[in-house]
Amino acid sequence: MSKLLAVGTVAFDAIETPFGKTDKILGGSGSYIGLAASQFGIETGVVSVVGADFLAADLEMMNAKGINTDGVEVDQNGKTFFWSGKYHNDMNSRDTLVTELNVLETFTPVVPEDFKDAPIVMLGNLHPLTQASVLEQMTKRPKLVVLDTMNFWMDIALNDLHAVLKKVDVITINDEEARQLSGEYSLVNAAEKIHKMGPKYVVIKKGEHGALLFNQGKMFFAPALPLAEVFDPTGAGDTFAGGFCGYLAKTEDISFENMKNAIIYGSNLASFCVEKFGTARMQELTAAEVSNRLQAFKDLTQFDIKLS
Ligand code: AMP
């Protein structure tokens, strides 16, 4: 069976959207990536850390989905990473209200033996030094290394981010962050500059406006499925990344052509993620729902134009 190793946060989130507010619920880049990848019937291992306050039931839920959590350390001396955010009325932008690193401050990731040879590694949103440490533990160079990050790490650990980017094949990043990282407003120019930092493939996520894939001069665009109601966008980016990597791991094909399909799969899964608060929708998602919506994606984007 194909293997995917993912590192990321397993967190508590408190979210406020125009539709309502939650107390602390399960969140984190590692949780969303794991849940998205679990749709592909591959072996997914998550490396992360949680505190003594974390709920055993949440780890059990992930295990029931087939996610291997042997690499999730439970640090009995600290509290779980906590993030709180509030969305604006358009749901396309949000303010981070709180980021409490807690157990992440002293976290040293340990990759389980079984995953040290994983062909695909997803370095989810986390401190770039933690991302680099995961790569250093691999027994051989993975076929594909994908990295996701955010402005938080650009603000406090830019040099470390540049160092790890040199070892990465694909970066997934949102449009605002691509502009911050590159200093370029045009996303085409931003991708060009980011290529020079290391990644041969640059995926720029544009929320409800879809995603762009750049590969040194080649370009592909996938729309996001227009939805009547977006309830909570939290985790959509991580779900996209988990779907992207999960599809590539399952098909064992990392060509540019296959990455186009991976982007569609990622966008498809992200469209479910936003339908309920937190991870709720991803926890209940069925294979039939996924495949029906893929058909909707196909119908949305297929046309038969005659070129003379
Ligand atoms: P997304 O909406 O895809 O950007 O991801 C939201 C998730 O990222 C939330 O569940 C948070 O727990 C997690 N998160 C927020 N800030 C950070 C951070 N600085 N590092 C890692 N994960 C974070």
Image (cartoon, helix red, strand yellow):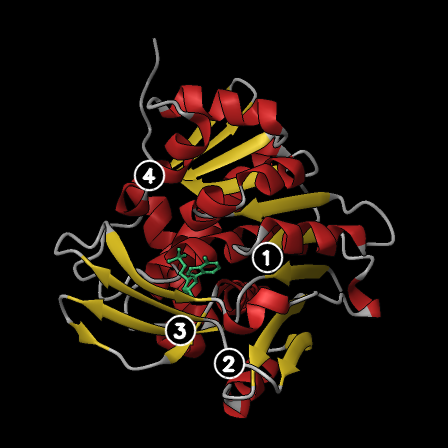
Q: Are marks 2 and 4 in contact (CB under 8 Å)?
A: no
Image location of residue 297, percent across then percent down: 35, 49
Point 63% across, 82% down: residue: 74
Query: CA–CA distance between discs 2 and 1?
Result: 30 Å
Chain-order first, disc 2 or disc 4? 2
Residue 79 image label: 2
Q: Nearer the viewer, residue 252 or 307?
A: 252
Residue ranking furthest to the top = 308
Q: Are marks 1 and 3 in contact (CB under 8 Å)?
A: no
Query: CA–CA distance between discs 2 and 4?
Result: 45 Å
Residue where numbered disc 1 is placed: 246
**Residue type of the residue flagged with mark 3:** Thr
Chain-order first, disc 4 or disc 3? 3
Q: Are marks 1 and 4 in contact (CB under 8 Å)?
A: no
Residue 186 shown left or right of residue 54 in the figure: left
Point 73% across, 54% down: residue: 133
Residue where numbered disc 3 is placed: 279
Query: CA–CA distance between discs 1 and 3?
Result: 17 Å
